[in-house]
Image (cartoon, grey):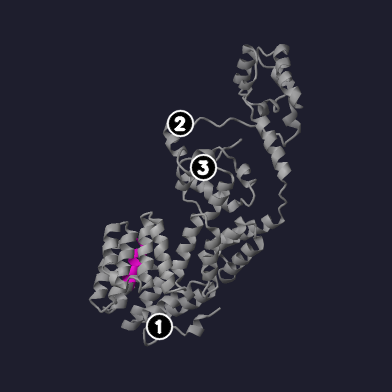
Amino acid sequence: METLTEYQIDLFAEQLPSMEQIKHLSKFVNSNERELAAFNEKLQEAMSQNGAKSTLAAGIGLFIIGRNAEAIEKLSKATDCKEKFIYAAFAARKLGKNEQAIENLNKSLEHQADPLTTNLEKAATYRHAKNFKAAANEIKNCVNFENVSAEYHYQLARLHQAQAEYKQAVENYKTALELAPDHQKTLFHLAFRCDLAGDEEAAIDYYRQIVAKAPVYTNALMNLAILYEDRNEFEKALRCIVKVLESHPNHQRALLFKKDLESSKTMVYDEEKEKKQNRKNKILETPISDFELSVRSRNCLKKMNIHTIGDLLNISEVELLSYKNFGETSLREIKVILEPRGLHLGMGLDDPGLAQTEPPEQEPPENQGILNKPMSDLQLSVRSRKCLERLKMHTIGELTHKTEAELLGCKNFGVTSLNEIKKALTGLGLSLRSLD
């Protein structure tokens, strides 16, 4: 892999690097924890100096490592120049201060900033603010660069994508790649678009083109690992995660994913056992109301909160007979239900595998609208979405009827996905079904 020293880009040298060089520097600094630490040391030294050059470089450096509020404050003290206003705009946009970003980009034009680059950055800022009309106008100002500039087609594609015009987005991503085959942001968004459209082969190809280049593109490696895992290519998935951890040893998502992958590699998937378990669950969840019982027996069971066959297995004959108005006649009726199925009262007390099951509680009317919404509204990661697709769940309501154990029992479904789903449901005031 290429390193910062090989690139010999020094933000804090006497001569400020070009914006293209600063862009490369930013990628390398954030691609490796070791490089980030080294860059931080140089940044702290620059921040202790008071010269105009040091102030500007320190402000840009603060933006590179994501300290955007500090970057804006530092840059405000620098001498006016295009770099000052452009990086102040970038930092403001990261903080969601889009009007301030536009104002700084306009000021950069007064200091000889490149009109194409600046107008496209204005378009991106308006897109972040969801002002699609203004974004389109800025891109129109650059129409002379159609079929000339990869960045023009990339920004146009991002605008189409934001407006759910996916066909036009893909066309412009592909045009951008024809003009600049190594345009990494284009490759990433095109790969992600292909994955969402179900074209996994194309998505994998685009992600592989990204990760073949330096520096490490963490998100591309993570998404590629998920696609490999979905195809049961666990070794390939693990190699992607290991590569992430080589550069970012403390990357929490990668660490959790690594554990899940190692578990998947050793997991024995017994399809016949799963079928038997499903048949058993269907029997246990059969409601008592499906059987012909006397009014007395039915009322007694209802008052005892016994609703399913599974509930009957978790209560003994003695407990039933001790209940008021429940006699030998009612007991015989119950045995007639259980014995043909090879079951008996109290069976669940001796066999922990026969867990008590309860019918899902009726949701209040105000929740019904949320429960009927499609799963896509939860905005889950690709990995979690794939797991739920395998479970053939399409609505949020179907998801809330599942227990944690049922989800974790799905092939390749790990704790990482479970925690993400629980967090998404909690945000809607919902939760998975509990048997407690």
User: Mark 3 touching mark 2, by CB under 8 A?
Assistant: no
Amino acid type for the residue under numbered disc 3: His
Q: In the image, which is nearer the foreground, mark 3 or mark 2?
A: 3
List the residue tagged with mark 3: 394
**Residue at (63%, 22%) from the top-left corner?**
288
In primary-sequence order, the first of circles 1 and 2 is 1
- Is 170 left or right of 287, judged from the image as shown? left
Distance of label 3 from label 1 (alpha carbons): 53 Å
**Which residue ends up furthest to the left in the rendered image?**
110
> Callout 3: helix, strand or loop?
loop
List the residue tagged with mark 2: 364
**What is the crowding at mark 1: few (fewer than 14 residues within 10 Å), some, or many (at least 20)?**
many
Distance of label 1 from label 2 (alpha carbons): 61 Å
Q: Which segment did they paint magenta?
A: 87-96
List the residue tagged with mark 1: 12
Q: Position of residue 61 (x, y in %)?
A: 40, 75
